[in-house]
Amino acid sequence: MAIDFHLHIPEKWVKEDVPPRVAAERLISFIDDSGIEVGVILPIAPYVSNDYIHRVVSYEPKRLVGLASLIPNPADSAVRELKRAIEDLGLRGLKLHLEMQGFCICHPHVVKVINAAGELNVPVVIHAMRGDLSLLYFRSAKEHVLPTPGRIEDYDLLPVLTPKTTINYVHMGGLFGFREFMAIVAGHPNVYLDTSYSLVTIAEEIGIERLSVYIKHLGADKFIFGSDHIIGLTRSGYQLRGR
């Protein structure tokens, strides 16, 4: 089964009140055209709500899977929302984004929320890209310094603090951090890497053969395919097709 674990709904769909049925049809059309059987939809709170994701995936529950998102601080309210999203709405995991949501990855409140996800038996998907080049599409290099999402030591410590939670570090750490994140994956049985956005740039930088060596040593089961495609806003993420 071909699964794209990393798809996004544009925030403007929410602002423009695009009916959930229409959103589901657009998503299904995209994955059909791309040869994908199941698409996993990742919202980022507060821009796209858990309730909207629930309504969208409910139209095609066999083809679309929805994750939840929330601001993980303060922990008590975040855990309540996580339980509601998983137990009441039927969402299947948690998406967190350090820069867009403004938190430190090893803050006690964040750790509590991630442990709660483990207790609910759902994975946590965390943005992890050192030197986020994607921001250059929106700002020039002269306007800002490329952010680094927390200390690499914190990403390495988090799986120790949350041993019962499956963690997916998306983007493989990016072009400037993939070696460090592959080392983290090698050291923790509960950590995986999402190939989205960075796979092509890493392959072009070090060569597909060398990248294949990394994947072989870590095991292909440690890598999760995702495109990071935003319907209607980005080009198809399936850039390796035919290579």
Image (tube, helix red, strand yellow):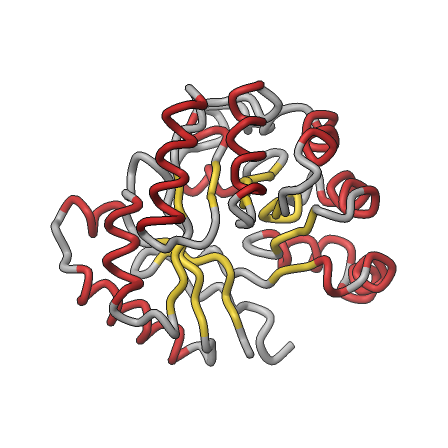
> In x, y percent, where is residue 215?
79, 61
Q: Residue at x 42, y 58 (%)?
A: 7
Above/below status of 19 relative to 159: below
The front one of 140 and 54 is: 54
* Quadrant in the rendering for residue 184: top right
> In x, y percent, where is residue 186?
82, 47
Above/below status of 72 relative to 8: above
The front one of 32 and 233 is: 32
> In x, y percent, where is residue 189?
77, 48
Please state if 136 lies on the left or on the right of 18 as rendered: right
Q: Count of labels shown?
A: 0
Please state if 16 lies on the left or on the right of 231 as rendered: left
Please state if 162 lies on the left or on the right of 53 as rendered: right
Q: Residue at x 32, y 67 (%)?
A: 27
Q: Which quadrant of the figure contains the N terminus? A: bottom right
Q: Residue at x 24, y 71 (%)?
A: 25
* Quadrant in the rendering for residue 131: top right
Q: Residue at x 54, y 45 (%)?
A: 125
Q: Which quadrant of the figure contains the C terminus? A: bottom right
> In x, y percent, where is residue 101?
42, 28
The front one of 8 and 141 is: 8
